Amino acid sequence: MTVKAAADYLGLSPHTLYVWRHRRQGPPSFHMGPRGRVMYRVEALDAWVREQEQADSRSNPALDPLSVRPQERSARFTTAGHTLLRRRTPSPSSQRSSTWPAT
């Protein structure tokens, strides 16, 4: 199947298929003939569409983030519900610098 026919089959533009091919994304293709025309197999297009469906969380319940119980937060990162922040302290060499703001 030619690039135009494959694009029509998938509901995409031929340009999209060319860009995906250049980026090594999209359905598998091959060169055919002495001029090296880019071609697609219908079986490969169908398999690629099935792979895309399985990779999408909306059509694959195993990937649905809402079906997984949220992980518990570790107590070491928070204290009484507040995140601890370190205050920036100047180093001895920077205290001599005029760029450090005076307190």
Image (cartoon, grey):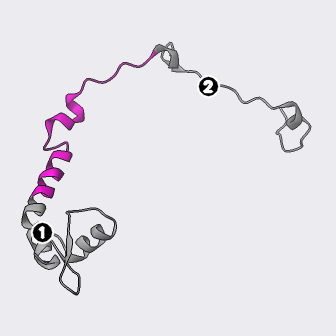
Q: Mark 1 touching mark 2, by CB under 8 A?
A: no
Image quadrant assignment for residue 72: top left
Please identify the quadrant where the C terminus is shown.
Answer: top right
Q: Where is residue 58 drawn, in percent x and y?
A: 16, 43
Q: What crowding class fits label 2: few (fewer than 14 Cα within 10 Å), some (14-19), or many (20 or more)? A: few
Taking the image as shown, residue 61 lies to the left or right of residue 102, namely: left
Decide: is 10 above or below 82: below
Q: Earlier in the sequence, mark 1 or mark 2?
A: 1
- Say which residue appears at 83% left-offset and 40% top-offset: 100
Question: Where residue 85 is drawn, which disc sits there?
Answer: 2
Please identify the quadrant where the N terminus is shown.
Answer: bottom left
Q: Farthest front residue?
A: 34
Question: Where residue 86 is drawn, which disc sits there?
Answer: none
Q: What crowding class fits label 1: few (fewer than 14 Cα within 10 Å), some (14-19), or many (20 or more)? A: few
- Say which residue appears at 25% left-offset and 23% top-offset: 69
Tell me the SS state at disc 1: loop
Front residue of this view, candidates 13 and 102: 13
Q: What stretch is highlighted in magenta?
A: 47-74
Q: Where is residue 15 drawn, in percent x and y?
A: 25, 76
Q: Where is residue 89 drawn, in percent x and y?
A: 77, 29
- Say which residue appears at 23% left-offset and 71% top-offset: 17
Residue bearing mark 1:
11
Front residue of this view, candidates 68 and 49: 49
Image quadrant assignment for residue 12: bottom left
Front residue of this view, candidates 68 and 17: 17
Tell me the SS state at disc 2: loop
Count of numbered badges drawn on the protein = 2
Q: Which of marks 1 and 2 is in front?
A: 1
